[in-house]
Image (cartoon, coloured by chain):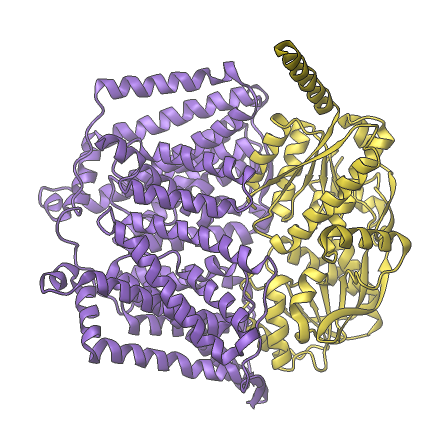
Chain colours: A yellow, B purple
Amino acid sequence: MRFARVFAALVLGLGCAVAQAQTITIGELNSYKVFPAFLEPYKKGMELAVEEINASGGVLGRKLELVTRDDGGTPGDAVRVAEELISRERVNVLMGTFASNVGLAVANLANQRKVLFLASEPLTDKIVWENGNRYTFRLRPSTYMQTAMLIPEAAKLKKKRWAIVYPNYEYGQSATASFKKLLSQAQPGVEFVAEQAPALGKIDAGAVVQALADAKPDAIFSSLFAADLQKFVREGNTRGLFRNTAVFNLLAGEPEYLDPLKDETPEGWWVTGYPWSEINTPEHKRFRDAYQKRWKDYPRQGSVVGYSAVHAVANAIRKAKSADTEKLIEALKGLEMQTPFGPIVWRRIDHQSTMGAYVGQLTKREGKGVMSNWRYVDGAKFQPSDEEIRKLRKD
Amino acid sequence: MSGSAILLQLLNGLASASSLFLVAAGLSLIFGVTRVVNFAHGSLYMLGMYLAVWLSAKFGFWASVPMAVLLIGVAGALIEITVLRRIYKAPELLQLLATFALVLVIKDFALWAWGPEDMLGPRAPGFAGAVAIAGGQFPQYDLLLIALGPLVFVFLQVILKRTRWGILIRAATQDREMAAALGVDQRRLFTAVFALGAALAGLGGALAIPREPASLEIDLALISDAFVIVVVGGLGSIPGAFLAALLIGVIKAFCIGLGYSKITLAVEFIVMAIVLVLRPWGLLGRPLAAARGAGSVEPPLPAFGRKEILALAGLAGALALVPLADSGYILVLLTDILVFALFAASLHFIIGPGGMLSFGHAAYFGLGAYGAALLVLRFGAPMELALAAGPLLAMTGALLFGWFCVRLSGVYLAMLTLAFAQIAWSVAFQWDSVTGGSNGLIGVWPSAWLASKTAYYLLTLLAGILGISFLWRTLYSPFGYALRAGRDSPLRAEAIGIDVRRIQWAAFTLAGVVAGLAGALHAFSKGSISPETLSVPRSVDGLVMVLLGGLHTLTGPLWGAALFTWLEDSVSRGIEYWRAAIGAVILLLVLAFPQGIAGYLRRA
């Protein structure tokens, strides 16, 4: 009797050990407490993808496991957490991060420790260009790409006097620099008449709106988001800043940032975003139905990013027929895969995926903000020349 | 700027000044009477915002304001009765630690109760539109705010000057012990003042919702603004707070109006630094009456006996042997702990034996890190040299800032260190071409022979032991005794020929160098640094470590650093609301061991 019990325990233990050896682990770290509005849906997207993959037999017959960690929102803590994932959890792949400085720090660590890092969310151009490295790949369309996607519409309006407002850190600074450069190329003679750079999260909206109005611009380019965007919109609406001024705003169509605006939603703004309720391609419908069934909630931009990032890892492993880092890197280069937004390719030259974004105009419907007049813009078409990228990457 | 632009920006400035004043007035009242530096004031404001947005959906905006005020007032009273009242007798900085724990708990409470998304409140009915002023459109609600600020100011002045209760508050602000001796019931007075201050924070929050969304980041953003106003105005002075709010609100609006929006990163701190250098007690403040009675003079630090030295040497030896047992993550964690222990020890050096409270010690940690990283990246220096020379940048910073800081004392000194730290931070943040801006400097790794986890850990251990024993040794040198004499009795110290300021300046610089060494070690252990290394939260972390371990012991900061780092690492892995969990642990420790962990052990 006792022997049987010991034997059973042994078998069970062995079984577990074997199963553990066979799982493939993604070590995910993100600033869950600093950017919860984006990252809670993101986590749900990841979990949905893992469940889907494991329900259909895993990858290479092995189960996929997701280990998530809070990176505390600072590069120092994030590097420690990443080290823990690498050396204690022995993960096969690192994934995640949100803010640019955290993403760059982890990318740099991945290069040092020779671990694959799939940067799912950070937008900074540098993570694939100036500070790009062999071990780092990035999913989301970069600041440059999203800015470039708005340029055709901006140039079409033939507005001469532009004012710019951006949160004063790398994302806002590089969005502004790219916008000025690209618009000047597309529309020679354009003037930039005012520039406001409030500190992130601390915009003094009344004074900023007033200063912009004083410059009498024909159009405004903004890269504000979250609380800054909401304050800016409310002040601008009250003070009539947007009445005769065209506005372009990066990211403002993402449900995370659009939904809180409700009946303040400004009409006619050009934005990049994610009109989740109206995209009816088969791949998106399948994703949306599965997501709503699983979470009883609608998907946000973050959900798509988390979901696609996990699938990217699974696809790379399938293609490489291994979870070995070097083989995964080769597999990711040029990997073609399906996402809820349609097919994407992982570029060989800079490890950036060609995931695009939806460009459209904001409008109010039943007291809620939605995107109208939107279309999907493929990220592959909004890239600098290969030569420019090679110069930046230095590798 | 045109004439109409000037007028409109002036009005913008006045509107922000009004809302700043509401928060700052509460903070100032609380500090004036209870001497509690209430970190949780911004959290109460944030709660006020969330409550008002939430209630206004059911009862309308105007009804939600008094309800939020009342609820936050009650919350303030409860905090005072359940937490702060128990620790007034403890060393004064402990209340600060308790309110920091409350910040963590309240933030996670708001996340739990209202979810992660920002909540934009309704416009105020009756004040939803704009009026035409000087050719521009100005929000009606902002006009209302401009009127409300002075109204609350007058209301507070009437209470303070014309009611018996107000007289008691003023008496307690000026001399707590004397007021108590004359039969004023301190317990009730403190609770009432705390509730009033909290209610003002709630009022500020509720009135802010037509202008900005309730979000989880607002608490810390607000608390530093409020502190600046209170200190610029003079601690405990309501007219001072009013004046300071006007000054800073208007200056900010004109920075933006004139197109210098980037300077808003640090403008209020620049104003504060200038005011404090020129007027050490703020615009309308007065020197604080020294607290009397037990607790104001610390017992002298006993030197280590043979037993303690043996125990510490044994600990160091054991730490050196860890790599034999485990060469993985434990070394990474221990490296972090050692770096922060060194940082905390350097902070303790000036706060404890030096008697100089600092809210901005991370400046020197960060300057050391930047110094080392710049030497490697911009000058191609070898890593060993950069590690040794990086702290020189911290020394330069400490020499420069310290010269101004040692001229002040108490919370004013602390706020000046904060101002300098914030200025250093904004330079690192903004000077893209040198410091890498908000992304920082990337790619600073140790030389090949130090690159393994084991080698780098042993290097950190060695540097930590050297740095900490150097600080401790210094405390028992004539210089150290002079420093402690200057803290305990500046007058007598001066009388026997000690140049107190000079000694303090030297101590400040020494602590800066050691913090810089910790920063340089940190940079090479992470491979990259960003402005976050010299930010306010990093300074606060250091303070929490020192206080958690116990201010008036030598080894306390080390235990505090170990406990805090370990807590963060382990709790954040397993618990969803880990911030609240850490806050709760700190609260429990504060209530159970008001002398800190090491202080408790020493007494036990």
Residue toward you, B266 or B603: B603
Q: Where does the C terminus of chain B fall, quadrant-wise?
A: top left
**Residue B100 appears in the rendering:** yes
Position of A383 with respect to A173 (left or right) is: right
| Nearer to the camera, A214 or B306 | B306
Give A237 or B137, whichever is nearer the viewer: A237
Give the residue drawn at x 22%, y 18%.
B306
Residue at 59% x, 69% y: name it.
B120
In the orientation shown, which residue stands out farthest toward the top?
A3
A171, above or below A136, in the image: below
Count numbered badges in the picture: 0
Provide residue B317's location: percent of width, then percent of height: 39, 16
Please say if A255 is above or below A74.
Answer: below
Q: Residue at x 67, y 75 (%)?
A: A263
The answer to whether B593 appears left or right of B48 in the picture is: left
Residue B279 visible somewhere in the drawing: no
> Quick one: quadrant of the N terminus of chain B?
bottom right
Residue A90 locus on image (x, y percent)? 66, 26
- Which residue is the extreme one toward the front? A1
Image spot of residue B228 (x, y percent): 38, 62
From the top left corner, tell me how far across and down residue B502 is, in percent: 23, 44
Residue that extends furthest to the right in the rendered view of this protein: A282
Q: Would residue B303 be found to the left or right of residue B18 on screen?
A: left
